[in-house]
Image (spheres, helix red, strand yellow):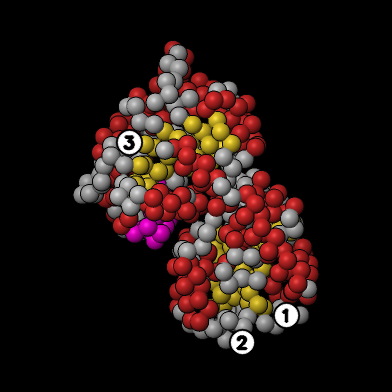
Amino acid sequence: MTPIAPFNARQKLTLVFYSLLWLILTPFTFIHFGWKYLTRKPGYNRSRLSRYGLLFGKKIRKDGLLLHCASVGEVVATQTLVERILKANPEQVITISTTTTTGAERVTLLFADRVNHVYFPYDFPIFINAFLKKIRPNKVLINEMELWPNFCKACSTRGIPAYLINGRMSDKSKATYKKFPNLFLPMFNCFETICAQGQRDYDNYLELGIAPNRVILTNNIKFDLSFSDTDLHTANTIKETFDIGKKVILVGASTHDPEEQLLLDAYLQLSQHYPNLLLILVPRHPQRFEKVHQLLTSQKIQVNLMSEAKACSNSTQVLLCNQMGKLRSIYALADIAFVGGSLAEKGGHNALEPAAVGVPIIMGPSRYNNPAICAALESAKALVNVEGSADIVAACHEWLTHPKQRIAAGKAGENVLQENGGAIDKTLEIIK
């Protein structure tokens, strides 16, 4: 393992104060867990005790690869990477950790029993050390920017090689890290290698003071996206179940408040000219499914719920996806896709998923999560910027009126993926 510079006295003291904050917070986190457990909230079972380093009753295969993904988006982003690792070595032990219930559910959905799942521990030394002693990883991969000082230090102390893969460092995050150099610079130096997903991220890591020999520009592994046979089979099942094979489909994907209302306003205008148009809404978070349903019914919108598996009629206006794990398959059915989090100031979600199946994309201006991806798609004319419902109407009207332009925009998106692929190959070579 590449040696790291020892912590100086100021850095050690900063880490002590940081750990004391966790000591103060821990009783509150446990009370929160206890309440959720007693009220039987989904996902709050004994498996969540791994957040305190306790893995009761879990048969975890040890001495393998630990991959940490914060939630659903990060799990999905690493799907192809995990599949490549398992294909090369089916006996490879992989444990994927998440911090959210939805992330845990996605791990199970994508990989079943081919990988282990655990909840990532809170960043307090006792919990971290108990967790690592139980998992006993021989290598750690952290995806994007889920970074914790005590965890990184514990890996370094134990001689466990750690890699930050598909590393993301926005200008906003860089400014935050710069405010606490004694806490975060030693953390970054605990990594064997930081694989930056874009030029902006690469430059920002260097500006934080990380040694250039620890940072490599690998590009974004999301460009190596591929749809599985399961995704396509599910798409066909949705099409047949809801009888939407002859519909023109506008997808509102990974939406936040107020994006559903903006899309609905646009849809109501467009449907006057395109009566065969169907809006499929896929809220980003499951806790908003019912709220979005109420939003639609309060405006007397004819809506079908995906959970009810009832065929759409001629009067159906909206198909609301109130189930997790269906978005990729829904993209495969789309004619046009709006990618959410972009009008709601959430930084925008993954625009490469619709591009991978040749679907033209609409997004708002908030794209700080994946600026390079969005810029490449917009430059290729696969993505159109919108500021509100009027712009959504204009963009959709243009593509629906001129299908050749819509098809060309979708093809341009596919080409962007092909031209920018290869990040997974580079990442695998680094972590071998």
Q: Residue 100's spot in the image, x, y percent?
A: 42, 50
Determine the residue positioned at 50% across, 51% down.
77
Query: Which numbered disc covers residue 138?
Result: 3
| Residue type for callout 1 | Tyr
Real-space CA distance between mark 3 and mark 1, rounded to the nearest whole angstrom: 57 Å
Q: Secondary structure at mark 2?
A: loop
User: What stretch of residues is rendered in magenta?
Assistant: 98-112
On the question of residue 165 being in view, the answer is yes
Q: Is residue 261 magenta?
A: no
Looking at numbered disc 3 in the image, what kind of residue is underneath it? Asn
Q: Which residue is mark 2?
A: 314
- Residue sitting at the far left: 57
Near mark 2 (Cα within 10 A), the count class, few <14, some 14-19 or many ≥20, is few
Dividing the picture into quadrants, the one containing residue 390 is bottom right
N-terminal-most mark, 1 or 2: 1
Q: How much space separates mark 3 and mark 2, taking CA atoms?
A: 57 Å
Asked which quadrant contains residue 176, the reply is: top right
Give percent across and percent down for residue 301: 61, 77
Q: Is residue 409 left or right of residue 157?
A: right
Foreground label between 3 and 2: 3
Where disc 3 sits, the SS reads: loop
| Predominant SS along the magenta part | helix
Between 187 and 124, which is closer to the camera in this rendering? 187
Name the element at disc 1. loop
Instruction: Tell me the residue at 68%/64% (across/down).
Output: 411
Q: Is residue 419 above or below residue 29?
A: below
| Residue under numbered circle 1 | 274
> Which one is in front, 325 or 12?
325
